[in-house]
Amino acid sequence: MIVHKESQLILKTMHKTTVFYTRVCILLSFVFWPIIFFLIFLRKNRDKEKTLEKVRILILPQLTRIGDIVCTTPIFRAIKEKYPNSHIAVLSSLNAYEIIKNNPRIDEILIIEDWKDNFLGFFRKIQESRFDWGISLSGTAFSSVLFFYGLIPNRLKITRERRPLAEVFSDWMCGITEKYVTLSYLPIFYLKMLRYLEIYSSEDKKEVFCHLGLEDRVDTFLKSKQVSPEDRILGISLTAGNRIKEWGDEKFELLSREIHKNYGMKIVFIGSPREKKRIDSLLENLGGSGAFLSAVGFSIEELPNLMKRFSYFISVDTGPMHIAHALGVPLVDILGPVNSIELTPTGRGVVVVKSPSNIPSTIFAFREELSQDLTRKSMDAITVGQVVEAFHRLFRRVEGSAHKGVIV
């Protein structure tokens, strides 16, 4: 996954500060709740003539995980299709902001790092924005506190099993809670939450929008690598936000050789500057052929412009995989230990490679990892031959007719 290192450091520091402020606010709320509820009542009463047509909504997705944020994009579309004049604001981290900044469905993005030294000012900002609805897709205690002290009249949050005590003690701050049952497909679950706004949509297609002004960078890069518009390109992502989910560079090397031998495709490896040495070493092992290329250094905002040029994409289960799915790039998802229901891509042009059935899933959307040993065992059990066969199957089906995603 491509991340901004500085943003990560800020977020780690902010997390400690946020936890402290959240706990203080929860304690204070048990004293001042009559006043806050009264202020919320006044605001709601003042705006009682306001219709949903111009509703102002603050949405809190997972702040840092790019794949999770891409999976929330169907709700932005659903809201705007129902209420074109609504105002959608999204809270995001600086890193994830780049993947939604060009989304025309979103009217405002609040970057959490901008408020790292002024959380009380952030609460005032929310109050002054006069949001009608707050929707928390993360279910955190912080989101409950932010909605409550931000005087948002309608507060909706997801709740989950095995959550921290701070979430349990702050649930009452949200007037509406929606319990997430593990092994539910999250994009559809998010859409169902919109029924409280009289929105009933099941269109779960994810969206990622490219910045047209960045096309020149991609064109220049491809020309410099002697890639013509007629060339078929296979994109590969070696890395994952969680290292334990990675498949292994040696396996990707063997996979790349096999696919190039059978299909003659150009193979482009994407990654952040931190992966440069790793990808350079892989290319050296592949023999320095012009068929194997490094695309290290493309920002998250630039990445969709590059990835939409890919004919196919192979990745472990991580953010770029969801970007490829949103762009409609046929892909092989090396799922491994990740639960195959909650966020796994479905639909046309998708083949999901899972570990053997006797190894249980260990990674879920809202649970801590069950066992690192099992997670590693799950990834190690996926063979190069298995992924090669998955790609063969994907190629045959994409080149033929439309098909549903399959699990192998």
Image (cartoon, rainbow, N blue to C red):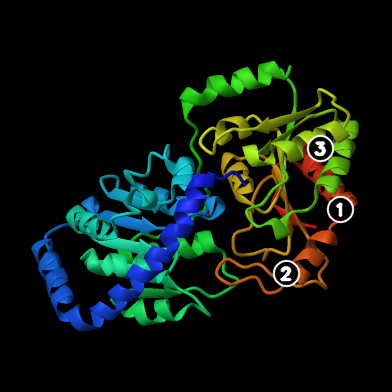
* Residue at 9 percent of width and 63 percent of height: 46
Measure the alpha-carbon separation of dots 1 and 2.
22 Å
Measure the alpha-carbon separation of dots 3 and 1.
21 Å
Quarter of the rendering occupied by the C terminus: bottom right
- Residue tagged by mark 2? 372
Amino acid on which disc 1 is placed: Gln
Position above or below: 329 against 334: above
Position above or below: 216 against 3: above
- The earlier-in-sequence mark between 1 and 2 is 2
- Horizontal side of 324 relative to 292 (left or right) equals left
User: Can residue 61 be seen from the camera position used here?
Assistant: no
- Residue tagged by mark 1? 386
Position above or below: 76 against 215: below
Image x and y of residue 34, in percent: 15, 80
- Residue tagged by mark 3? 282
Amino acid on which disc 2 is placed: Gln
